Amino acid sequence: MEQDIREVLFSEEYLAEVVQEMGRKISEDYKGKNLLLVSVLKGSVVFMADLMRAITIPCSIDFMSVSSYGSGTKTSGVVRILKDLDVELSGKDLLLVEDILDSGMTLSYIREMLQQRNPSSIRLCTLFDKPERRTADIQADYSGLQVPDEFIVGYGLDYDEKYRNLPYVGILKPEVYSK
């Protein structure tokens, strides 16, 4: 896997610092609220695990699985719900946790769908923001790092279900995904 990485963007240590700071801010903002973290699988699972440990107030968690990419490198524009939430949202302060905010189409669709279930609030949290690729009118309420318009992998991010287990985030060599 290492030989497929052109450049390391963010080290494991730096990612840990960023996630700790995000957890501190979320803990402050949600003090006294009914916080529900919702991980958008599969990419956000690593971030979600670290983020929930960085949050110092009571919270609950749930998971959604959606698909808009298939095995390609660009979103198809069609969002499919593969696994819906297990909990009722009414009265919950929902924080959608995503690995990367790219086109924004997936998060925009999920947010609209979940808003109809009457949560007390919905906010968006992403570790990586790629504003150059945004096509939907959406912004993260909590954003860790802005990334260049490159294909990045590691720390949960994948290409064709590979590289998620890298502890850092790196730029994938174009020859790997343009075959």
Image (tube, helix red, strand yellow):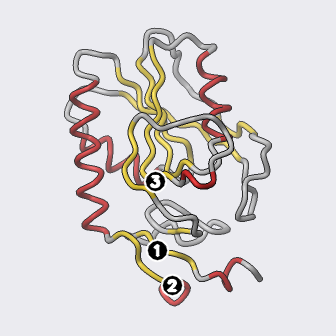
Circle 1 packing at 10 Å, graded few (<14), some (14-19), many (20+), is many
Residue at the image point whose x is 58% and y is 37% from the top:
64
Query: In which quadrant of the rendered view does residue 167 lie?
Result: bottom left
Asked if the residue under mark 1 is in contact with the one under mark 2, i.e. CB atoms within 8 Å, the reply is yes
Query: Is 71 situated above or below 83?
Result: below
Instruction: From the viewer's perspective, tell me whether residue 78 is left or right of residue 150.
Output: right
The single residue placed furthest to the bottom in the displayed view is: 3
Image coordinates for residue 12, horizontal then vertical, percent:
31, 68
Residue kind at label 3, given as amino acid type: Phe
Q: Secondary structure at mark 2?
A: strand
N-terminal of the pair, mark 3 or mark 1, is 3
Using the numbered discs, state the Cα–Cα distance from disc 2 to disc 3 in whole angstroms: 18 Å
The numbered mark at residue 142 is none
The numbered mark at residue 128 is 3
Circle 3 packing at 10 Å, graded few (<14), some (14-19), many (20+), is many
Residue at the image point whose x is 45% and y is 28% from the top:
123
Q: What residue is disc 1 on?
A: 170
Residue kind at label 1, given as amino acid type: Gly
Residue at the image point whose x is 53% and y is 62% from the top:
157
Image coordinates for residue 82, horizontal then vertical, percent:
70, 40
Q: What residue is disc 2 on?
A: 6
